[in-house]
């Protein structure tokens, strides 16, 4: 049962962790806003737009900073109990170290649920809205992102992209040409990749809609500009000399594409299944998926990692020392996580193993430290 002692320890960790998280997110948001000021004045991007964009990215910042914030908060919260001799009194009253550890673990499970819920619901939607707002203000392009992919407008053609890969390869591309409020041509390509200064469409199915008939044609591959020249129906006056609009600008994709780390685990899983069903490389998306799974678990590991430092010096070391320890451990975890995941992925190891390896390393260190200090 979660008794009075467990609630007291949990509240100490929760309050300090939330305060640290708010501080870190505020600092990250301030620096993010300063960075956005460089783009103010481009297109219709104004200071208010930059502020809205930064505000919408706050859930993403909170998600990324949650584990380090919990580590710092635990060091400060439990450190305060140790400095006030409260942990010593608990031990003298017959409360074992295992009971204290249990209270910390139960609190960690609750924090895991909070961050998992944030990463699956609020953060992905907020990141999508933020990128849409920024793109619209900077590029003045029609783009709508929803449950049915990414929509863009290219001249008189409406483009729907099912999936944007990290290398900006497009999957499941549909193009509809509209003239006089009617669809005159529809094209679907399984894949589109950038080749030199054009897009190479692959596995194409073209449907032409004329007044008296509908015809269908299949083509293995074709460049986008060649496709437009061959399949545009009846050029309007003055269009012959106009440059052909791109299928989609690479800059637009860079602006609008939400990184895999910002997607929900369900969306990442759907992308993995789509890629596998089309015999495409899914390892990078799989890595993002497993990193997403490991992120809530890192919260619990960070709490456990703080325990050896608290038990080892219940009377020595002030807040400054604990903050320094927390910052150094947080930096080491972030760097080690990035390095090990990328190296493991590059060496051909399983994405699941690549994502969980840093977590397992820190878990082993935490368990050894706890055994030596309790």
Image: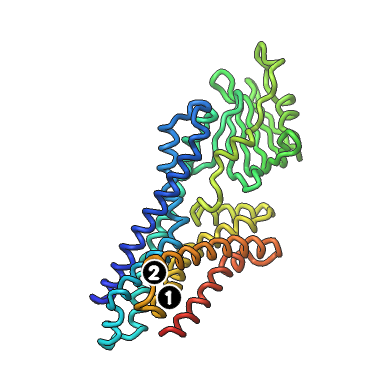
Q: Looking at the figure, which quarter contains the N terminus?
A: bottom left
Packing grade of label 2 (10 A; few <14, some 14-19, many >=20) is: many
SS at mark 2 in the image = helix
Q: CA distance from mark 2 to mark 1?
A: 8 Å
**For the view shown, which residue lies furthest in the left direction?**
4
SS at mark 1 in the image = helix
Assess whether mark 1 and mark 2 are in contact (beta carbons under 8 angstroms): yes
Query: Which one is earlier in the sequence, the residue at label 2 or at label 1?
Result: 2
**For the view shown, which residue lies furthest in the top direction?**
237
**Left or right position of 249 against 36:** right
Disc number at residue 75? 2
Packing grade of label 1 (10 A; few <14, some 14-19, many >=20) is: many
Asked whether the viewer can see residue 158, the reply is: yes
Measured as percent of width and height from the top left, residue 147 is found at 49, 44
Q: Looking at the figure, which quarter contains the C terminus?
A: bottom left
Measured as percent of width and height from the top left, residue 85 is found at 28, 78
How many marks overall?
2
Asked whether the viewer can see residue 112, the reply is: no
By what rule are the colours in the image chosen? rainbow
Measured as percent of width and height from the top left, residue 96 is found at 33, 86
Residue drawn at (44%, 66%) of the image = 299
Disc number at residue 309? 1
**Left or right position of 160 against 316:** right
Which quadrant of the figure has residue 202? top right
Residue drawn at (25%, 87%) of the image = 93
**Left or right position of 334 against 74:** right
Residue drawn at (70%, 64%) of the image = 348
Residue 281 in the image: above or below residue 343: above
Which quadrant of the figure has residue 310? bottom left
Measured as percent of width and height from the top left, residue 80 is found at 31, 70
């Amino acid at each position: 049962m979660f008794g009075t002692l467990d609630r007291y320890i949990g509240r100490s960790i929760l309050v300090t962790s939330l305060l640290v998280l708010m501080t870190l997110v505020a600092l990250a948001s301030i620096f993010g806003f300063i960075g956005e000021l460089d783009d103010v004045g481009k297109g219709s991007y104004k200071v208010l737009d930059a502020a809205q964009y930064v505000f919408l990215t706050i859930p993403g910042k909170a998600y990324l900073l949650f584990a380090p914030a919990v580590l710092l908060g635990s060091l400060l919260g439990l450190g305060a109990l140790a400095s006030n001799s409260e942990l010593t009194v608990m031990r003298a009253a017959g409360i074992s170290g295992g009971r204290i550890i249990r209270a910390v673990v139960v609190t960690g499970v609750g924090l895991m649920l909070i961050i998992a819920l944030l990463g699956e619901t609020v953060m992905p939607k907020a990141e999508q809205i933020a990128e849409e707002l920024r793109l619209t203000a900077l590029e003045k392009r029609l783009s709508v992102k929803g449950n049915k992919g990414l929509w863009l407008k290219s001249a008189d053609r409406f483009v729907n992209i099912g999936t944007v890969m990290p290398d900006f390869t497009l999957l499941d591309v549909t193009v509809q040409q509209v003239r006089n409020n009617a669809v005159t041509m529809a094209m679907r390509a399984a894949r589109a990749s950038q080749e030199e200064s054009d897009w190479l469409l692959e596995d194409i199915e073209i449907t032409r809609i004329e007044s008296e008939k509908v015809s269908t044609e299949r083509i293995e591959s074709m460049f986008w500009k060649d496709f437009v020249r061959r399949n545009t129906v009846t050029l309007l006056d003055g269009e012959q000399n106009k440059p052909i609009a791109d299928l989609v600008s690479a800059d637009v994709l860079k602006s609008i594409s939400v990184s895999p780390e910002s997607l929900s685990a369900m969306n990442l899983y759907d992308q993995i299944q789509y890629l596998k069903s089309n015999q495409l490389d899914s390892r990078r998306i799989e890595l993002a998926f497993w990193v997403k799974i490991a992120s809530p678990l890192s919260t619990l590991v960070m709490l456990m990692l703080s325990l050896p430092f608290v038990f080892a010096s219940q009377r020595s070391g002030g807040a400054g020392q604990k903050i320094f320890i927390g910052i150094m451990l947080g930096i080491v975890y972030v760097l080690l996580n990035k390095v090990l995941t990328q190296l493991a992925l590059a060496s051909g190891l399983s994405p699941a193993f690549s994502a969980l390896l840093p977590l397992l390393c820190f878990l082993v260190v935490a368990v050894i430290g706890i055994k030596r200090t309790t």
